[in-house]
């Protein structure tokens, strides 16, 4: 019997550099608009040639994941750089509300959490745990912790191991971050709400760690419904 197998090709070093930087962007560790290390610094850090880094960077530029600004450096791309992706354009054209945003997140993130419970590896679980720790540290210092919150949700998307889902969430990230910031600002008006949010994030992580797909789905659903209910009851 003839089976259509393809020969295995060793992965180029530039592909490995590309994969590592892309993963940091998709996980939310490198955030939209953030300035990146120089080509030389990246080469030194990753112990590869500058030519190898340049090749990987150009591929990331072509994807719109990073942008290069003459005389300023290299930055993680935002939805405002390059051609605006159709998801964001549609959201702006429709005058999207926070409630609309949360309803879309419900569909995307419940499924992502369910998949993450099955597919997450040790590095995914570690990334989510670190995000929660960063949230707690930020809150203790009187800040919102919204960057770490958004990174937590991006880490779940990455753990789904679905490349299309990760890409959609990446394109959605700037609006996700804005929504989380606005939600937390409102939630801060009532004592105890932020502590509830942290507990909910820990419940999501616990379900994913336990490989409980249904529990992870329900935990995200509970978290987003909590914020939706709060916004629904908020005056004005």
Image (cartoon, rainbow, N blue to C red):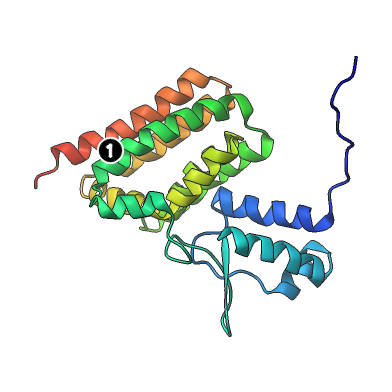
Q: Nearer the viewer, residue 93 or 124?
A: 93
Q: Is residue 53 left or right of residue 173?
A: right
Q: Residues within 10 Å of mark 1 (few under 14, many from 20)?
A: many
Q: How many marks?
A: 1
Residue at horizontal 47%, vertical 51%?
171
Q: Nearer the viewer, residue 52 or 195?
A: 52
Q: Quadrant of the N terminus?
A: top right
Residue at horizontal 61%, vertical 36%?
125
Task: Please indicate, yes or no, whether residue 169 appears anywhere in the rendered image.
Answer: yes
Image quadrant assignment for residue 196: top left
Q: Residue furthest front?
A: 2
- Residue 117: percent from left, percent from top: 56, 26
Residue at horizontal 32%, vertical 50%?
90
31 vs 36: above or below: above
39 vs 171: above or below: below
- Residue 20: percent from left, percent from top: 70, 53
Residue topped by disc 1: 227
Image quadrant assignment for residue 195: top left
Q: Is residue 50 left or right of residue 59?
A: right
Task: Please indicate, yes or no, whether residue 145 appears anywhere in the rendered image.
Answer: no
- Residue 153: percent from left, percent from top: 47, 42
Q: Nearer the viewer, residue 99 or 181?
A: 99
Is disc 1 placed on a helix, strand or loop?
helix
- Residue 227: percent from left, percent from top: 28, 38
Residue at horizontal 50%, vertical 32%?
112
Q: Is residue 16 left or right of residue 204?
A: right
């Amino acid at each position: 019997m003839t089976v259509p197998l393809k020969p295995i090709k060793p992965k180029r070093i530039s592909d490995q550099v590309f994969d590592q930087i892309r993963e940091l962007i998709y996980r939310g560790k490198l955030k939209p608009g953030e300035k990146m290390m120089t080509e030389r610094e990246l080469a030194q850090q990753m112990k590869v040639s500058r030519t190898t880094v340049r090749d990987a960077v150009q591929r990331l530029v072509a994807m719109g994941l990073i942008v290069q600004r003459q005389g300023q450096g290299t930055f993680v791309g935002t939805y405002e750089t390059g051609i605006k992706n159709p998801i964001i354009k549609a959201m702006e054209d429709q005058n999207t509300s926070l409630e609309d945003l949360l309803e879309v997140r419900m569909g995307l993130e419940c499924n992502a959490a369910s998949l993450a419970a099955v597919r997450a590896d040790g590095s995914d679980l570690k990334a989510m745990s670190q995000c929660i720790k960063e949230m707690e540290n930020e809150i203790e210092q009187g800040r919102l912790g919204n960057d770490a919150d958004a990174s937590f949700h991006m880490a779940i998307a990455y753990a789904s191991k679905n490349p299309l889902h990760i890409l959609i969430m990446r394109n959605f990230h700037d609006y996700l971050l804005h929504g989380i910031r606005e939600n937390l600002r409102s939630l801060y008006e009532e004592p105890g709400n932020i502590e509830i949010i942290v507990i909910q994030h820990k419940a999501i992580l616990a379900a994913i760690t336990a490989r409980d797909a249904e529990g992870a789905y329900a935990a995200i659903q509970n978290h987003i419904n909590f914020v939706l209910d709060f916004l629904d009851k908020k005056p004005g």
